[in-house]
Image (tube, rainbow, N blue to C red):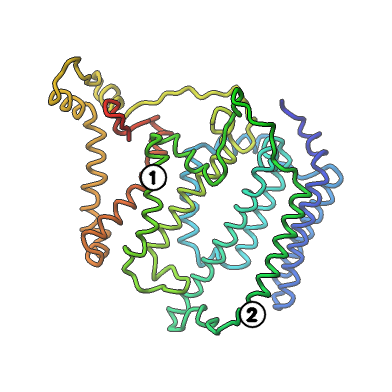
């Protein structure tokens, strides 16, 4: 049932008011910091931001919280589709990487955090957005998203600073903190403080947010949507694009084995014990892309954009339980033979011998097999002689083969996602005769 936006804003007045008060207080802390560092220009900037959030808090308490126009929300929902969201986040990561020296500046990072908090505040006036974000199961995920952004910025900022110092012939920042610290009382004292803070946070959390308990499990009634815990939502989202054996077994095993193999595959002796990007550029790009784009992104999609019947919904779109997307999956073999060549897909004749049957299956799946052959055989050889020539020479055949296989399997996920969303390709190679699909 749709809620009246004005009534909903009135109901959210107290929450949004205190939300803006907290944000204004954080910016007041930034003002105090700038005064202590004698940065008067930024003091004026953050003072103005503090006043702006204070005004927003006053309006929220008065029932007139800042809200997005319905036309703007409609445009955002129309733009944020599966393909645009995935490609857009990839472009965003590329821009952040190329301009990292600018984006790690404290003023720029603080401005970005304020923009994200403002967007969160104005979006909370929408009933559908608020229902998803304030769901007790999703509250810690929202917090972790912000914490992930903060710690990613923190590590990147240290890496950029170390790259600058190394370029000047100076030691990294970590060398300034290599003095020994006594376990007792220094480390134990800090751990005690951390434990007390964590306990207070958990107590306040448990008092402020209702526990996400539901009725006793009923085998007759299945929740719609039925979602796994957040740390398994990435695997559940993979099931949309891959066969269960691949998404549930092969890919998780390759993740674990790949992480175990990293120390044995790495040949770069630089960047040991300190943050750096320039000295570990390849490792940094691969791990950031794999973690942020291929894992965190899937969790965000599964948490905030998957609704009833596992349909994709916009940020402000009504979670209609009756929404059903027509399944128009097509195998690559069908796309190649029927759509591309205008011919019927080769079928295995009844009673055919083993050789004829195998030849027919190979001919039917020739497009997918060719794609996999080029992707997993020809492309690694081509890369070893061009872009990854130095890696091939230093790693050797065995380590290079393992490394490039892991990398290509990782890239297969976004490729399959784009194929699924644009061409509705369900399987690149389908072998139902052998209970195997890829």
Q: Residues within 10 Å of mark 2 (few under 14, many from 20)?
A: few
Q: Nearer the viewer, residue 225 or 158?
A: 225
Q: Quadrant of the C terminus?
A: top left
Q: Quadrant of the N terminus?
A: top right
Say the numbered circle drawn on residue 184: 2
In the drawing, does residue 324 fall left or right of residue 136? left
Judged from this view, the residue extending furthest toward the top is 350
Helix, strand, or loop for circle 1? helix
Decide: is 29 above or below 403.
Answer: below
Please provide percent x and percent y for residue 110.
Answer: 64, 62
In the drawing, does residue 244 fall left or right of residue 130? left
Decide: is 361 above or below 136.
Answer: above
Q: Which residue is mark 1?
A: 251
Q: Residue at x 82, y 38 (%)?
A: 11
Please provide percent x and percent y for residue 269.
Answer: 35, 73
Calculate the distance from the C-alpha at mark 1 to the C-alpha at mark 2. 44 Å
Judged from this view, the residue extending furthest toward the right is 62
Is disc 1 in contact with disc 2, using a CB cutoff of under 8 Å? Answer: no
Q: Residue at x 71, y 73 (%)?
A: 34
Please provide percent x and percent y for residue 42.
Answer: 69, 69
Please provide percent x and percent y for residue 437.
Answer: 32, 32
Helix, strand, or loop for circle 2? helix
Q: Nearer the viewer, residue 249 or 163?
A: 249
Work out whether mark 1 precedes mark 2 in sequence or the reverse, and give the earlier one.
Answer: 2
In the drawing, does residue 100 fall left or right of residue 18? left
Q: Residue at x 70, y 78 (%)?
A: 37
- Tell us which disc is closer to us: 1 or 2: 2
């Amino acid at each position: 049932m749709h809620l009246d936006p004005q009534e909903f804003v009135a109901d959210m007045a107290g929450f949004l008011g205190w939300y803006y008060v907290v944000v204004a207080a954080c910016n007041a802390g930034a003002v105090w910091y700038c005064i202590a560092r004698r940065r008067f220009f930024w003091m004026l900037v953050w003072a103005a931001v503090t006043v702006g959030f204070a005004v927003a808090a006053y309006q929220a308490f008065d029932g007139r919280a800042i809200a997005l126009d319905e036309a703007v929300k409609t445009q955002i929902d129309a733009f944020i589709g599966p393909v645009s969201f995935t490609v857009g986040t990839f472009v965003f990561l590329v821009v952040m990487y190329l301009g990292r020296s600018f984006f790690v500046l404290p003023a720029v990072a603080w401005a970005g955090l304020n923009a994200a908090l403002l967007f969160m505040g104005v979006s909370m006036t929408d009933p559908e957005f608020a229902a998803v974000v304030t769901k007790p199961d999703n509250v810690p995920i929202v917090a972790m998203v912000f914490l992930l952004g903060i710690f990613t910025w923190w590590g990147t900022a240290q890496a950029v600073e170390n790259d600058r110092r190394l370029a000047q012939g100076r030691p990294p920042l970590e060398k300034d903190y290599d003095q020994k610290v006594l376990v007792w009382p220094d480390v134990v004292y800090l751990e005690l403080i951390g434990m007390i803070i964590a306990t207070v946070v958990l107590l306040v959390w448990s008092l402020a947010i209702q526990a996400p308990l539901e009725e006793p499990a009923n085998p007759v009634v299945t929740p719609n949507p039925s979602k796994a815990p957040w740390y398994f939502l990435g695997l559940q989202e993979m099931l949309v694009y891959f066969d269960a054996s691949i998404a549930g077994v092969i890919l998780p095993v390759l993740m674990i084995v790949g992480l175990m193999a990293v120390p044995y595959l790495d040949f770069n002796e630089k960047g040991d014990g300190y943050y750096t990007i320039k000295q570990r550029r390849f490792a940094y790009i691969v791990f950031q892309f794999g973690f942020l784009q291929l894992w965190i992104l899937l969790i965000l999609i599964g948490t905030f954009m998957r609704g009833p019947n596992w349909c994709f919904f916009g940020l402000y779109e009504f979670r209609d339980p009756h929404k059903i997307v027509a399944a128009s999956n097509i195998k690559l073999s069908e796309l190649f033979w029927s759509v591309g060549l205008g011919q019927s897909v080769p079928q295995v004749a009844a009673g055919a011998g083993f050789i004829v049957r195998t030849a027919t299956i190979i001919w039917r799946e020739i497009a997918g097999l060719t794609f996999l052959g080029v992707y997993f055989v020809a492309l690694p050889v081509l890369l070893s002689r061009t872009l990854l020539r130095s890696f091939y020479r230093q790693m050797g055949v065995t380590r290079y083969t393992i490394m490039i296989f892991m990398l290509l399997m990782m890239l297969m996920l976004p490729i399959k996602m784009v194929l699924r969303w644009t061409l509705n390709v369900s399987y690149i190679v389908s072998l139902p005769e052998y209970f195997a699909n890829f």
